[in-house]
Image (spheres, helix red, strand yellow):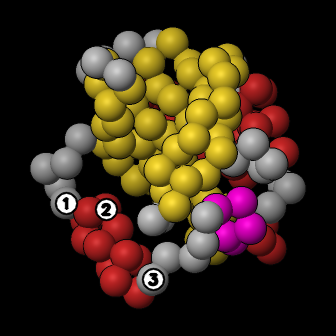
Amino acid sequence: MTAHQVRAESDEELEKRHTRYLRTDAPGQVLVVCDGDAVVGSVAFWEHTDGDDVVWEAGWSILPEFQGRGYAGRALEALIGVIRSEGTHSAVHAYPSVDNAPSNALCRRAGFVLRGTTPFPFRGGVLLSNDWVLEL
């Protein structure tokens, strides 16, 4: 699950992220992706500062045993619908690693446009990422 990331999260970082996800006053949402009773992953969006603009950032994670079955595409489509209904920001960005072919293909299929490549601070390091944007 961390092949396309700088490194795995420490226990402390994981706890902080989980606590952030549980906050009900934070802008954005986390959606659990299920197939029947099986949890297969999650998709989420949160506020992100892009230059002088505040935009949405989206991310997703599908468990390895469920990858390649279309869950991420359907979940991202649903997430974009939720983001559009928020009506808060004009764009949503995604920042997959440049070498994460499945996530980059997912962005393209979902209608995101590749804006460029950017060094993206992530988990105590820098991840060379593609900056995909979907104008809302």
Image spot of residue 74 (x, y percent): 68, 41
Judge whether 55 appears above or below 121 on screen.
above
Mark 1 touches mark 2? (CB < 8 Å): yes
Q: Residue at x 75, y 42 (%)?
A: 98
Q: Residue at x 51, y 29 (%)?
A: 93
**Label 1, label 3: how many angstroms apart (C-alpha)?**
20 Å
130 drawn magenta: no
Judge whether 75 appears above or below 116 on screen.
below
- Which kind of residue does numbered mark 2 sit on? Tyr
Which residue is the site of mark 1?
23
Residue 40 is at least partly visible in this image = no
Horizontal relation, residue 112 to residue 65: left or right: left
Mark 3 crowd level (few <14, some 14–19, many ≥20, 10 Å Cα): few
Q: Residue at x 38, y 13 (%)?
A: 90
Range shown magenta: 1-5
Q: Among all residues in the image, which is located at the extreme bottom?
A: 11
- Which kind of residue does numbered mark 1 sit on? Arg
The N terminus appears in which quarter of the rendering? bottom right
Residue 49 is at least partly visible in this image = yes
- Which kind of residue does numbered mark 3 sit on? Ser
Instruction: Report the mark closest to the observer, 1 or 3.
Output: 3
Image spot of residue 6 (x, y percent): 61, 64
Instruction: Report the mark closest to the observer, 3 or 2.
Output: 3
Which residue is the site of mark 3?
10
Residue 132 quadrant: top right
